[in-house]
Image (cartoon, coloured by chain):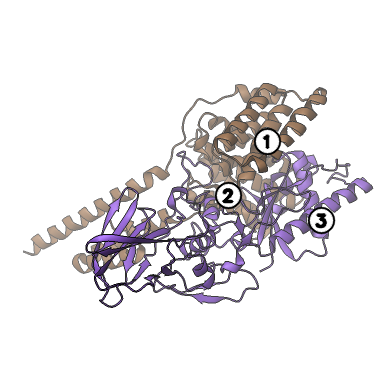
Chain colours: A purple, B brown
Amino acid sequence: MTAVAEILSAELSVITSADPQSNQNQSFIIMKSAELVQQGIKNKSQQSSLGPQTPLVIEYTTPLKRNQQLEWEIKVADKQYGTIRLLSDFSGKGRLLNSGYLWKSARLNHQIKDRQRLIFRPQPFAHQPKIYKRGKGRTGQRQKYGGGTQFINDEKYNPQLKYTVSLNILQDGKTISQHQAILEMDRKDMIRQEYINHYNIKRYGRGENGNLPVPTRDEISDVPPLAENLQGNPLTESQYQLIIDDGISNLAQKINTAYQQRIQQLKKQNTMKDLNQQTLEIPQSKLWLSSGWRNPERNEWYSNAVNGIHQRGGAVDFIIMAPANSRESSIAYWVLWQALEASQHLDAFWQLEVNGRPMTTREFNQDIEPANGIPDAFDKADHLHANINY
Amino acid sequence: MAFLMPLTKQITYMQILITKFKYHAFMLLILSVSFSSSSMADTEFNDYFQMPSTIDSRIADQVTRYHAEDIALNPAQQKQELTDLEKQLNRMQDKYNRDASYWFIKGLNNKNMAAFYNSTGNIKLANLHTQTKNEDYRQALILSENTPDTLTPAIYNAMKHGLSENLKIQATQSELSLGGNADNESAYWHLHWSNIDQLKKAGRDDEAKQAFENMQNEMREKNVDMSVYGELNEAIEKTTFKNSATNSTQTRKPDENIKADSTDKAEDEPAEDKADYIMPMLLFFSIVSLVLVTVYEFIIKKRKK
């Protein structure tokens, strides 16, 4: 994947976006013309309205001679996406190639106004949920429970749009020079486009439809290293190698520290008792960071929480690094819970999750099989979710 | 095909029909709206356990509510309602005897009753219902043994606690075979670890090794990032295989109850799937209703002439 698009000809000037950073990288996002969504996803960000971005403008800056003509071409990288609306007043035609859609102008007389400037707008594309159910479902296929893809550009659900614009300068019917500019979404704008495409998507089942703001480019950053002693995923399962970090790095570190300190404390005191006042073995297991920031497609693959805080970069999930639902795992979740309850400096919310959804208060409090001395909630938990307070 | 349209369009469509067919069409409107809203409703049971209930969904939903939500009734009313649900479930036992999801719902109701008696301090009745719950879940697992996809990962996950060793292994393996249930990949691989660990602890060493190999093969096939998950593989080697090799004398053998579990297999009989019949039924009723209304109108017109 090319991160930054190129201008291959110095004589072509290119404007791709109203956003200076996107423009600098010759990158762009696509908004519906009548759509206004909020921009600024982090907790303390000042939100602003994000309207339609500038159309793509490519201009040949060198003056042409009287007997010279121009011929513009636009090729898209993908047949499935990249439909354009031409705003320049040119005649031309498009055709479908195996390698992508091609639009080509007629041979243009440069003496007519604005022939040296090509203006077009990429057409917005609708979010195309690929519907899945958690697990393989009854028919062996994921279905009707979220959608999304696991990876970048997987089956084109989060495509990296790219336009190759070529200009031929002709004299007496012969091409005398060729110029090319490549306009391509970079990874930050691919992420932003995902948020745009997922704005207002339907939540399956109960709850509100999606309405998360779009992150600004400044809110997307490189993935920070994982805290010491913490294992698992690098604060994101996303393949972008970028992250929105609204405090998860700090939160993950604090939770891990609280857990490790509690283990050390229990080891020193050796007084951990179960519900039957029997001495419990102090768990040895580390915490495994299973989830941090999720891009919307990824979130949709796994979760029905269309407004989930993972997409804001404000939530982390932890698994005990032990066999799921084993005694070791149950005791360790109990210790982790105690550690968080005792923690004075944790301005966060946390909950146990089971079956991939929050454990309800009733489920948490029910304890009908205490024979093993551990509250049922910790026996059943499959992970702990924590998020900063919004 | 009015029932397939959004509600607003249905109403517009029905208004046109009403002007044409007057009062008779009104019946069709009620029929259509009531069918569509009931079939499209996202029920509690469906929401929590990710499949439509095969039994009366009102009962399944109420049992699910008692499982998951705080109930705003006093203890006497709760007891009454739980007992009523138990009676209704018992009455349908003959009909749904071979239906794994029925046994799960029945077990869930017994779990709710155990929780209720536990909260009121009646430990004897709580234990009795816990035992019955385990028996019900056992029955659900026996019926779904060869057709795990008659239930969902969420149901297997909910059932496995408190079961005997071999049944717990079966529930875990069924959950795995359906792709797991949690909302991240790590939980799925930890579920694999759970399966391996349970097999090892049950003294089924060869199966445990095979399960570990299967997990590693699956990781390779799925191109899992080994810079992350390599640690998990090492942990499984270190804790499950090496630790148990040094503590092999502690390995438990399957007890008599578990042997009985494994011999008491039900014949493979897929559960009835009511959900598959809902849409054709709606289609059938709507067409029949439309035809009847048209014929009736035709007769009335003829008589007037």
Closer-to-camera residue (B74/A286) = A286
Closer-to-camera residue (B200/B215) = B215
Q: Are marks 1 and 2 on the same chain?
A: yes
Q: Nearer the viewer, mark 1 or mark 2?
A: 1
Q: Residues within 10 Å of mark 2 (few under 14, many from 20)?
A: few
Q: Determine the residue located farthest toward the left in the rendered image.
A: B305
Q: What percent of the width, then of the height, locates residue A372?
A: 79, 40
The residue that label 1 is drawn on is: B193
Mark 3 and mark 2 in contact? Answer it, CB < 8 Å.
no
Which chain is disc 3 placed on? Answer: A
Q: Residues within 10 Å of mark 1 (few under 14, many from 20)?
A: many
The residue that label 3 is drawn on is: A258
Which chain is disc 1 placed on? Answer: B
Q: Is residue A124 above or below residue B142?
A: below
The residue that label 2 is drawn on is: B84
Q: Which quarter of the rendered picture does the C terminus of chain A lie within?
A: bottom right
SS at circle 2: helix
Mark 3 belongs to which amino acid? Ala
Residue B133 seen in render: no
Mark 2 belongs to which amino acid? Asp
Q: What percent of the width, then of the height, locates residue A191?
A: 53, 60
Q: Is residue B261 above or below residue A312?
A: above
Mark 1 belongs to which amino acid? Trp
Quarter-wise, where is residue A103 in the image? bottom left
Closer-to-camera residue (A44/A161) = A161
